Amino acid sequence: MPTRVPSTLNTVLPVAAETVTATAATAKRRNGPNPTETADAAAGLDAAELRAEVIAWFADAGRDLPWRHSECSPWGVLVSEVMLQQTPVKRVLPHWEEWMQRWPTPADLAAEPSGEAVRAWSGLGYPRRALRLHACAQEIVEVHGGKVPADHEELRALPGIGEYTAAAVASFAFGIPATVVDTNIRRVEARAVTGNALPEKSYTRAEAVLAHDLMPNTTTIQGIDEANRWNAASMELGALVCKARTPLCEQCPVQHRCAWIKAGRPAPHYTPKGQAWEGTDRQVRGAMMAVLRGAEAPVAAELLRGVGHVETDIAELAALRHLKADAEQRERCLAGLLKDGLAAQTDAGVTLPA
C-alpha cells in the first residue's frame, strides 16, 4: 500500500528498547491526582515494543486511502482531516474525491463563493466545517502564497484548524513528528496502557503526557519515521479493531500486552451519551440546508418557517415540512443558520452564502 507517511526508510527499523518510567511523577506534578491512574499504569511499559507491533500490523492491515498516497498533496491531507472530524471514512471518501477533483488546490476553492463549499458539503454533517475550510483556503492563498504551511504554529493559526488537525497535517503531510491524538488513539492508549475501557470524557493533561511519552525519540531519522508511522498506525488500530462499542480484541496485535484485557475487560467507568437527532435543532437545520442546497433560486423564508399550507413536489421541502418542529424551533433554526453564515437573507429570499 502506498503510504502518505513520508519516510526515507522502506521498512520499520529496530530501535533501542525504552521504558516509560517518568510518566507517573510528571502527570502528578502537572495534573494532580488522576482517578484513572493513567501515568501509574504507563510506568514500566515497553513503548518501543508496543509501537513496533502496532506499526507492523498497520503495514499489512491499514486501509488504502487516497489521502495516504505519496502523491497526495498537503492540501489533500488537510481537506481529509477536516472532513474526517466526527464523520466516518465511508462517508468522507466520495466527498473527498469529488472535492479534490473540483478544488485540487487552496486557490481553486478560495476563488469560489463560500456557498459552493457549503453546497458540496451535503451529507457530511456539521456544515460550518465547510465555511472554515473555505476561509482556510483563502488565508493559505493570501498569507502563504497558496501553499499549505508546514510549521505547526502557522497551521494552528489557520481558520478552523485546531491542535489535533495541525499536528495531523504536520505529521501526515510533511513528516514532522508532532504528537497526534484523536479519539481513536486515546481509546487505544486507554485500553492498552491504563486498563480503562474508554478514555476520559474530555482530553486530560495526563492523557497528553501519556501520548507524548509513548512517542519515540525523534532526534534521528529513524525516530522521526517511526513517530509518523505510530501516529497513523495507532489511529487506524482504534478505527478498525479497538472500536468503542465492539472491540475486535482477537484481531489486535497487542492483545497479549493490553492492560484492559489483563484486567478482565472491565466496563467503562462512565456511560457515554449518544447524540440525539430526532426532533433536535440539528435535524431541523439540516433539513433547511437541504432545501437551500437543492434550490435553483432564493427560497422564501416563510417556506422554511413552515408558514401556511403548501403543496410541493420538492422532496427536500416536503421533508422539512413533515418534521415535528413548532414555529419557535423553526424560527430559531433559521436565525441560527443566518447568524452562522450558512445562509444569507436577500430581498428575493434565503440562499446559501455568496
Image (cartoon, rainbow, N blue to C red):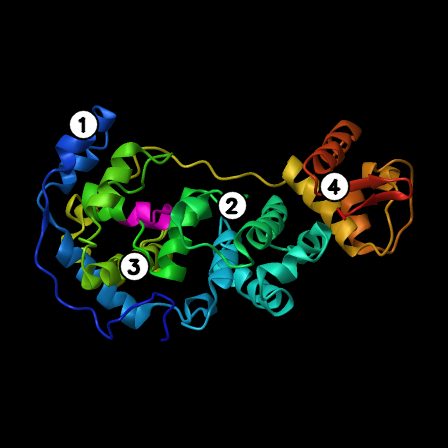
**Based on the displayed image, in which of its 4 quarters is residue 206 positioned?**
top left
Position of 349 with respect to 8 (left or right) is right
Which residue is tagged 1?
A: 28
Identified at 21% across, 36% down, the residue is: 38
**Circle 4: element type:** loop
Foreground: disc 3 or disc 1: 3
Q: Which mark is residue 228?
A: 3
Q: CA distance from mark 2 to mark 1?
A: 33 Å
**Circle 3: element type:** helix
Which residue is tagged 4?
A: 323
Residue 309 position, x and y percent, is: 91, 40
Name the amino acid, label 3: Asn
Foreground: disc 4 or disc 3: 3
Identified at 58% across, 59% down, the residue is: 106
Q: Which of the two labelled residues, at mark 2 and mark 1, occupies the earlier sequence position?
A: 1
Name the amino acid, label 2: Leu
Residue 234 position, x and y percent, is: 29, 56
Q: Which of the two labelled residues, at mark 4 and mark 1, occupies the earlier sequence position?
A: 1
Residue 48 position, x and y percent, is: 14, 56
Q: Which mark is residue 295?
A: none
Q: CA distance from mark 4 to mark 1?
A: 51 Å
**Circle 1: element type:** helix
Identified at 82% across, 36% down, the residue is: 305
Foreground: disc 3 or disc 2: 2
Which residue is tagged 2?
A: 158
Q: Which of the two labelled residues, at mark 3 and mark 1, occupies the earlier sequence position?
A: 1
Q: Which of the two labelled residues, at mark 4 and mark 3, occupies the earlier sequence position?
A: 3
Name the amino acid, label 1: Lys
Position of 302 with respect to 225 (left or right) is right
